[in-house]
Amino acid sequence: MPTLAPLEEVNEIMKGIWESGIMTHNGPLVQRFEREVCEHLGVPKMVACSNGTIALQMAIKALGKTGEIITTPFTFIATISSIMWEHCTPVFVDIDPETLNIDPKKIEERITCHTVAIMPVHVFGNACQIDEIDAVAKAHNIPVIYDAAHAVGVKYKGKCIMEYGDLSCTSFHATKMLNTAEGGGVFTLNEELDERLRRIRFFGFENHADIVEDGFNGKMTEVHAALGLANLRYLDKALADRKEKYALYKEMLSENPEIGFQKITTDCNYSYFPVIFRDEETMLKVTAALNAENVYPRRYFYPSVNTFTKIVPYIPMPMSEDIASRVLCLPLHVRMTMQNVEEIARLVLKTI
Ligand SMILES: Cc1ncc(COP(=O)(O)O)c(C=O)c1O
């Protein structure tokens, strides 16, 4: 369920589009959205784009190299497809089964002379072990692109998480903490990369004249930016609401020691409530019991992406495959009540 600003507020911002006739091409609302998101999160710059997958592709393109990209198998398929669309090869490193993020201790052994980037994911908005990842990356002079699709509102050591890595990419998809229906953003502190990203987003044009990059159409429209600007006013409320519901789920479900939770590293935006069951059978039993009451949890991420053998050769990733087989994200959104959370938690406890 999306977090949506009142329709009148969206309409008020939309009016400008009807007045000016400007619907796209880095229009005034997209520029305002970039500015206001940055002010809100406390970062210098963001390049808004059409979705989170394109954000990742723009980031890889901006680095300008093809080769191997080290990433996690416990992610959404878009992390992998963006790597492959940019003519690179995903190289998987298994996860830490507690944090559900890439295990930083296992990265170094997969680095080769073909490695062009490391692309960790802040899974479910749980910050990666950034210091450890950066230390490995710096030792080998390899750039880091964070897939921060889930991570709007997360901080690391007091700073916005989007400031870390050479580039950080987020999603403004309808299900995310901040949404523009479909949308994405790329963050970098590197001026040169920022400028390149803006050209890549606009077909590779420089000054509407010459093509200087291998670009594509990655633009965000004015309509999406208007929705984002209105929704941004409700971001802090949405973050607080999620945190409160997350805490209630956790308190109630902790009653059963067999239920496992994601270990929060330093900070998290509590945008999802993943539950790790003893085995797949228990997870399926809980799913069926919830579905019978019209409650629809989601197997997310499932399956582990290294098992998509139509697109990648299978290499076992035991931790990721194990977690993917028994993890379930329970409903968590602004439209549910605390009572709904209680009812769902009670149903889970009763079923197992
Ligand atoms: C980890 C991760 N990366 C990337 C994406 C892609 O984002 P989008 O749906 O905006 O293309 C998603 C989407 O949910 C995601 O979960």
Image (cartoon, helix red, strand yellow):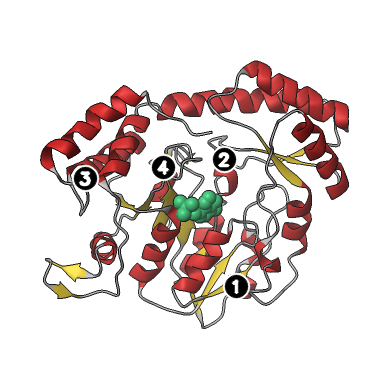
Which of the marked residues, 1 or 2, is nearer the chain's N terminus?
1
Regarding residue 140, the answer to whether it shows in the image is no
Q: Residue at x 29, y 56 (%)?
A: 219
Q: Give the percent coordinates (x, y) of residue 128.
A: 56, 50
- Quarter-of-image position of residue 316: bottom right
Q: Which mark is residue 266?
A: 2
Image side of residue 176 versus residue 17, left or right: right
Instruction: Decide: few, some or many residues near mark 3? Use Cα within 10 Å; few <14, some 14-19, many ≥20.
Output: some
**What residue is disc 1 on?**
91
- Quarter-of-image position of residue 75: bottom right
Compared with residue 245, is residue 298 higher up or lower down, i.e. above or below? below
Which of the marked residues, 3 or 4, is nearer the chain's N terminus?
3
**What residue is disc 4 on?**
181
Regarding residue 298, the answer to whether it shows in the image is yes
Q: Give the percent coordinates (x, y) of residue 328.
A: 72, 42
Disc 1 residue type (three-letter): Val
Q: Marks 1 and 2, how far apart in space?
A: 26 Å
Q: Give the percent coordinates (x, y) of residue 339.
A: 67, 16
Q: Marks 4 and 2, how far apart in space?
A: 29 Å
Compared with residue 146, is residue 8 higher up or lower down, i.e. above or below? above
